[in-house]
Amino acid sequence: MDSPTSPDAPNSPDGADGTPGTTRPGDGSGTPLRQDAADPDLRSQEPVGRCGRREPIDMATGEMYLVQKDVHLPGVLPLVLERVHVSSYRSGRLFGPSWASTLDQRLEFDEHGVCYAGPDGVILVYPEPPADGEVYAAAGARWPLSRTTDGGYTIRQPQTGRVLRFAPARAGTAELSAIEDRSDRIEFDRDPSGVLRAVRHSGGYQVDVLVSEGRVAELRLHDPRTDGIPLVRYAYDDGHLTEVVNSSGRPLRFAYDHAGRITRWDDRNGEWYAYTYDHRGRCVRTEGSGDALAGTLDYDTDNRVTTETNSLGEVSRYHFNEFNQLIREIDPLGNETRFEWDRYHRLLAHTDPLGRTTRYRYDELGNLAAVTRPDGTQALIEYNEQGLPATAVDPDGSVWRYEYDESGNRTVVVDPTGAITRYGYDESGHLATITDHFGNVVRRATDAAGLLTAVTEPDGGVTRYQRDQFGRVSVVLDPVGGETHLRWTVEGKLLSRTHPDGATERWSYDGEGNEVDRIDANGNVTRVETTHFDRFAAQTGPDGSRFEFRYDSEMRLRAVRNPLGAEWTYEYDQAGRLVAETDYNGRTIRYERDAAGQLVARTNGAGETTLFVRDALGNIVERRSRDGVATFEYDPAGRLIRARNEHADVRFERDPAGRVLAETINGRSTVFAYDAAGRRTYRRTPSGVESFWDYGTTHRPVSLRTGGRTFSFGFDAAGREVERLLDSGTTLAQTWTPAHRLSSQTVASVTDRSQGAMRNLYQRRYHYRPDGFVRAVEDDIAGVRQFELDANGRVEQVTGTAGSERYAYDPAGNIRAAGWAGAEDQGPREYQGSLVLSAGRVRYGYDRQGRVTFRQKKRLSAKPDTWHYTWDSDDRLVAVVTPDGTRWRYLYDALGRRIAKLRLAADGTTVAERTDFFWDGTVLIEQIGSDATAISWEHDPGGRRPLAQIEREFGVDGARQWVDRAFYSIVTDLVGTPTELVDPHGGLAWQGHRTLWGAALSRLRNRAATPLRFAGQYHDDETGLHYNVHRYYDPESGRYASNDPLGLEGGFNPQAYVPNPTSWVDPLGLTAADGCGPDGPDGADEEYVPLYKAPQRGLGQQQYDHGYNADDYGGTGPWAAGAFFARDRELADTYAGHYGEGVIEIRIPASEYADRFARYEQPYQGGPLTEVEIPASRVEELNQYPRKWHR
């Protein structure tokens, strides 16, 4: 073994002067690149990705690398200026000898050939290119080098379509002169002496480069009206970069040893990290402020093994081959992962600790041609003569086909069903049109950089974008004239957003770009604190409530402390995997994982264990618990096709694109059909109710035929529904505020069709605070309701015609007191941790898993009413005994959806009454009762709001068929809760009358009824609870009867419903969504609907800082068709485990999400999770919203 020594080494370099042709000072032999590339195999490897757990240390060589991005100006070809420090690199010039950079890219020539200096410390060694041909590097990326007719050189990067151009050589060096892609160009301007002075983009950007004594002193965004906008300033000591100052005015500082290696950095918040090297220049020790990520490294050179010991004493080992490629990784638990590589550092095989191998095959040009998965299935890609994907075959045999123009722009995509999407480009090569299978065209106007300036929908609606000098959206002009104004920091952080109604939100940041506070449109302030490595340390809400976060020295989250002082804690195994969490109430859930880190067992707080069995691809194929066995089957593409348990056999039939054509539950099928654009056009429920959807030129429907009736829909240019007309003459008219919030709803009926005369039946009007919370509702029937809210947006008092309600909250967001007329739940509430023990005269009991086991209502002069509840090991309510002794059972399918409820006879066994339920993904669409009745529901295309209720009977007058009995239009409030049922003639058949939290206030004399409540909820008369897909909600307490399955990911108060139900819903019983109010009291970012995406390796920082580029999406391979985002963090975390870049969360105001993106939701693989496929033409709209990076 090699023992560590002091961080000193010989051959300390002096600074370089940054001019062309410079060689290593004091050396005199060969070129600096040739000397640095003495081992071409080592230098041809990208430094990013070579590290183990002790990032940023290369486990093979002990090199430390540090990536810094100084400038990112968006465009189809973004202007990116970055620096990379590599501790062994000595060929840097403009930022010091140990920094490679975009600006230092060059070719150096000697008698042996050519060396290319990349922006990331990579050096590629080429032979001298011939006059009319191409040569490839001896090792590393397969980028051909060739000569140009003007005496210069080019390097082509086929995978990105980019070309690097170099000027004719001077004094043995050819400087980078331009970077080109299919449409744009970045030029590097130099003065007559060869010193770089500016970087110019064909889109109009110019970054001025101020050079002093051979070093870059400052970068400025060029502005002819001023001296330019300062971007970054640099300071040096003895030629080494020592300070980087951003717009905060604070420096990031670097310290070096005598060999030019960074030994320490101190960031702009006072945090630091340090490195110690041995006599061979290998990093052997790291340490940081607060002991964060401290560790040691030991190198066994003879056996090519590196041993890493982290700050907790956990040991990992890395084995390398003679090319310094990682071939074995052994984690602290002894689990081994194996890798195989080719000479060009391309991964050939990956074998996980369970022995499952994924193999990769490349064509002669280095393009990925095949992926063979552990189960033997393959994904294949064939390329055209341009090196672009022409055909992609999914593992199930589905084929995608692509066509391109002469410049390599994708012009046609044919999906596996034969649907064709065409793409057109402007004279600059920027995407200009997207034409669907039916000829409907989305037109894109772009600026010179290829950034969107306008999108024209096929129906003529135009959204326009104005951009600042940095290319960032500064104004969004919506199709109805509303303007949203955005301001940004120099580094691209959102400073303010002013909505069309003038309401403004503001953010501020520290020197490292971490959010410090945000001020909502009402002036309420939420403050944020960070700790080591920019981890979230605390959040203080507008009311002073404070959540704190504690980490161990490996920066793993160990505890969350709520404002009441209760802690939620996490435990990890030696490999850093979560193995247990203990909630605020002392309930512990334990997780057992296999060698590959997959969950194989979960034991809940009641000691109930669920076991998981997985196939070779990691899909769960069996789930075992004391309640029975559930099995799952998948097609070759990994999509769910069957799920079985003792109560249900669920089968999915899919088309080649993966869309569900039929879902069959216990032999009863729901059938679906789609048009070539992927829009749902038909559905038939098990009782035979058919729905036919027709669409116009956009994704928006124009009509729905169902239950013997026809709806016609009208939308304004912004896509907001303004009219819904039933063929019988009843209409629902809606108006909207400039901020796209629902303003009024009017139900009317036609009195004279010939004259078009209408009679208003009733109207409802909404009034809002500046932050978007509802402050009053005027209803012609129910009267006026006014809401008094606290700083967090929680309702403290409701006053109005129908009476008043009062609520008080503790700092954790629990309702500590409530009052409304005639309720046993009114009065003070007592809690133990987050569990409510009593609410007025109602008491609750719980098991060790935190599930309600009994609820008892005390009567003043009678025996208490008591409900007893029984749960399964998945926290699903399976049985209830009501106060009169009646027993009920509830059955679920293997996906967790309730498929039946049964009322038992007095013997406790015989079924006296049964109701079966049927689903469309996670949306309830029909119930069929044992009394030969059925109720069906039709929702809008996104499944968010119910539109119609159809009631049927079987066997009427002896006929052996279903017969329609009643049809009702459903009117919903702004969050999708049904408020009225209207018959075809405009008559009011039912109206809901409920408290703020959904409890029934009185039983009106209605002619009809609906069990639908808050979005995703179904009311059970026998319990008073609302079934909410993953949980049961108690509207009298405003809380769930069990814990959130997502833990704190669903919100910091895991039993609470949403903070304000006038603006928020929880359609799955998991997390708040789809409203228009700001942050809830639990601090769970409930101002927004979150979308999650796991960036691919190496793209995390770029996508976090600058967002998404439309040209990166749209179906360029077998796994891409548009930009896929997840509504559920769980889904994104699955991909994050492969990419290793964490998860980026995009926070979209709920009203805007509903208007713009909700329509793209779809169930993931037919299961309970939701993904959102956003078209490439709209993906850049996401860039205006705040982002969080969960690393």
Image (cartoon, rainbow, N blue to C red):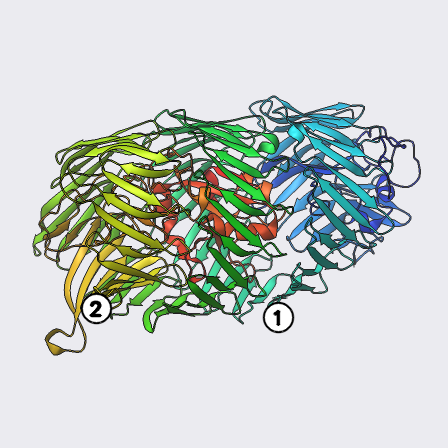
Q: Quadrant of residue 502?
A: top left
- What is the three-letter code of the residue carrying label 2? Ser
Residue at mark 2: 930
Residues at marks 2 and 1, CA–CA distance in whole angstroms: 47 Å
Q: Closest to the observer: 1137 or 1126? A: 1137
Residue 507 percent across, percent down from the top left: 46, 28
The answer to whether any part of residue 59 appears in the image is no
Q: Residue at x 28, y 51 (%)?
A: 868
Q: Quadrant of residue 436?
A: bottom left
Residue 972 falls left or right of residue 297 = left
**How many numbered marks does the figure carry?**
2
Mark 2 or 1: the one toward you: 2
Q: Is residue 246 above or below residue 467?
A: above
Residue 388 falls left or right of residue 602 = right
Q: Is residue 654 above or below residue 771?
A: below
Q: Earlier in the sequence, mark 2 or mark 1?
A: 1
* Rendered-image quadrant of the N terminus: top right
The answer to whether any part of residue 1066 appears in the image is yes
Residue at mark 1: 376
Residue 59 falls left or right of residue 727 = right
> Callout 2 environment at 10 Å: few (<14), some (14 to 19), or many (20+)?
few
Residue 1071 percent across, percent down from the top left: 39, 45
Q: Residue at x 37, y 44 (%)?
A: 1073
